[in-house]
Amino acid sequence: MSEKKEKIMIGIDLGGTGIKIGLVDKAYEIIAQTTVPTRGERPYQQVIADMGNAALKLLEESGYQVSDCLGAGIGSPGMIDSKNGIVLYSNNIRWDHVPLATELETYLPMPVYINNDANCAALGETVKGAAKGCSSAIFLTLGTGVGGGIVIDGKIFEGGHPGGAELGHIRIASEGRKCTCGREDCLEAYASASALIGDAKRMAERFPNSMLWELCGHDLEQMNAKMPFDAAQAGDPCGQALIGLYIRYLADGITDLANIFRPDMFVLGGGICAQGEKLTEPLNRCLRENCFGAFVSYVPPIVIAKNGNDAGMIGAASLVASMQKEA
Amino acid sequence: MSEKKEKIMIGIDLGGTGIKIGLVDKAYEIIAQTTVPTRGERPYQQVIADMGNAALKLLEESGYQVSDCLGAGIGSPGMIDSKNGIVLYSNNIRWDHVPLATELETYLPMPVYINNDANCAALGETVKGAAKGCSSAIFLTLGTGVGGGIVIDGKIFEGGHPGGAELGHIRIASEGRKCTCGREDCLEAYASASALIGDAKRMAERFPNSMLWELCGHDLEQMNAKMPFDAAQAGDPCGQALIGLYIRYLADGITDLANIFRPDMFVLGGGICAQGEKLTEPLNRCLRENCFGAFVSYVPPIVIAKNGNDAGMIGAASLVASMQKEA
């Protein structure tokens, strides 16, 4: 029984579809986990009740008590007021000023901390993952959008006020691409998986003799972010043009962030990262060629995230340790 | 004599032409100051000897001793290794790995701190200036280039490694403008005073019936950054187009930085800032319209720096206080 008495953390990954809850030990290994559906269309109180009750059940089933927990961390999509534990707004779950921490504490009597999911994932990669041991790191997740997380001196940096660390929303071009945020030409409009898929669809439509058109089975709706990489790999000129541009756009955003933060490391997450070195090798080359004062300064390596599907839970748990170290 | 015993700081503004040295009290008032020519073409040891001897002479003439000083701060152009007190390189004075702090300490037996001049100016504006009392601020200086300084939690943030906080070197467009850093389309290539003057020259040349051509006395070499503002103010379409674009470019860079840092305030320095509200009013409007989540988040005001010609000395002195608070 004695090993069960080591303090643990609860890491909660709040997603649009499901809520993943993990019990995480001090080495950031997941001891036990469960998932409940989000069903975000319900009143938020019901969503949080499900979250709290599922966590309590998981603790009980795993032989832990509330008193064994250092606290619970939640990685949430959207704009977060981390000081007050409030989800200011989330497109994803349609929440508006939801007092998530206070509400969850009525179920889980322990310190509850919230932060943006990408921020949590960034922190998680520095405690267990690709940037383990780094004191500073920038994390970019390439999915529907481009999410960003910043770690400085081993802590999440979210900016002075809500609305900071929105790394997908820096302007990298002037082609007039509309971004979901309302502005034009944000990194997200060029470097998200959605942007790559959109570009691939347009390219396949315009060049029906290209391999892209074959790979999607002559159905643009089947296009995914892997296909342009596969086409490029096979020597298809359309695929090569697409990937060349995609790398260039992403490298532009990363170079900006290098010139601002010059972190120990850049970490990339999201489905596109399955491409591994096909992605990181040309990105690293572009960064070395373009970052400010590369000949005299440190050029951070760009690597692929390692925490995979557990990134949300591990990151949320690492938030607990980070906040309690700070306090 | 007793008021003379209050501890003071030495603030040194190392410029390409002259070295300004100020004795600064704890309220960041300059008690006494002197200037010596830089003559940066000499061996660095001679430049630093002049700096140290001039500081000692100023102390003596003002009735202070070395023991009255908390330390000396130096704001230096170029890329700085602040931990080790080294100027890694400076285009301006043509220095390469100069151990400025150690060398100056042989003349001034007190703690010597170095940081980039724009970083120092940023810090100075938060202790005495436009952002007084702010815990976070971003400073941009619009001159030959675009220099940047970041203050987070009352301290200079210079990035994890040398090469950070280079805020003039974030990409804001894709028009293919060459930047002095070797990359294309950096903020500096659009929003520096030099960029505005270059644009104004091209415009005046192309439209010799414009007011710009009159204002420069039909001599493009006489063009300065004030003329396009004057032409715009007087209703000249060329002037209005130039200033409209200039504001847009600068606002793009500031919006990026708002989405990353969301500081308490943005502070602008450099000669162009004599334009005052003609500059800040449209910039503030652009930022409110474009920054991420403006409807739910804090939109930082953009203001003009207040420390003027003393910014370098005050900023360098504030570095001493900041470093000793941190220690």
Image (cartoon, coloured by chain):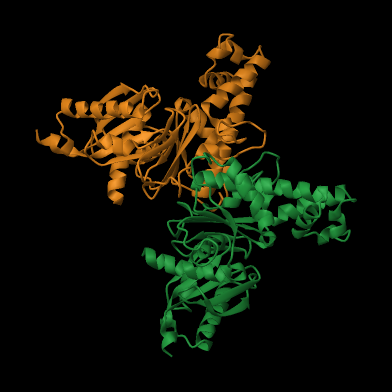
Chain colours: A green, B orange
Q: Position of residue A97 (x, y in %)?
A: 53, 62
Taking depth in this image into account, of B121 and B307 the one nearest to the observer is B121
Q: Residue at x 64, y 37 (%)?
A: B173
Quick one: which residue is furthest to the right in this view? A209
Q: How many marks?
A: 0
Q: Quadrant of the N terminus of chain B?
A: top left
Q: Residue at x 14, y 29 (%)?
A: B63
Q: Is residue A178 left or right of residue B83?
A: right
- In the image, B71 versus B312, the foreground residue is B71
The extreme left residue here reads: B1
Up-down relation of residue B255 to residue A38 (above or below): above
Is residue A30 shown above or below B132? Answer: below
On the image, the x and y values in percent for residue B314 come to 32, 34
Horizontally, residue B133 falls left or right of residue B2, namely right
Residue A150 versus residue A136: which sits nearer the camera? A136
Whether residue B203 sits left or right of residue B50 in the image: it is right
Q: Is residue A170 visible?
A: no
Q: Position of residue A129 (x, y in %)?
A: 54, 65
The image quarter containing residue A227 is bottom right
How far across and down, in percent of the image, does residue B293 sit?
A: 57, 51
Q: From the viewer's perspective, tell me whether residue B211 is left or right of residue B13.
A: right
The quadrant holding residue B97 is: top left
Residue, far bottom: A1
Residue B140 showing in the rendered view: yes
In this view, B60 is above or below B134: above
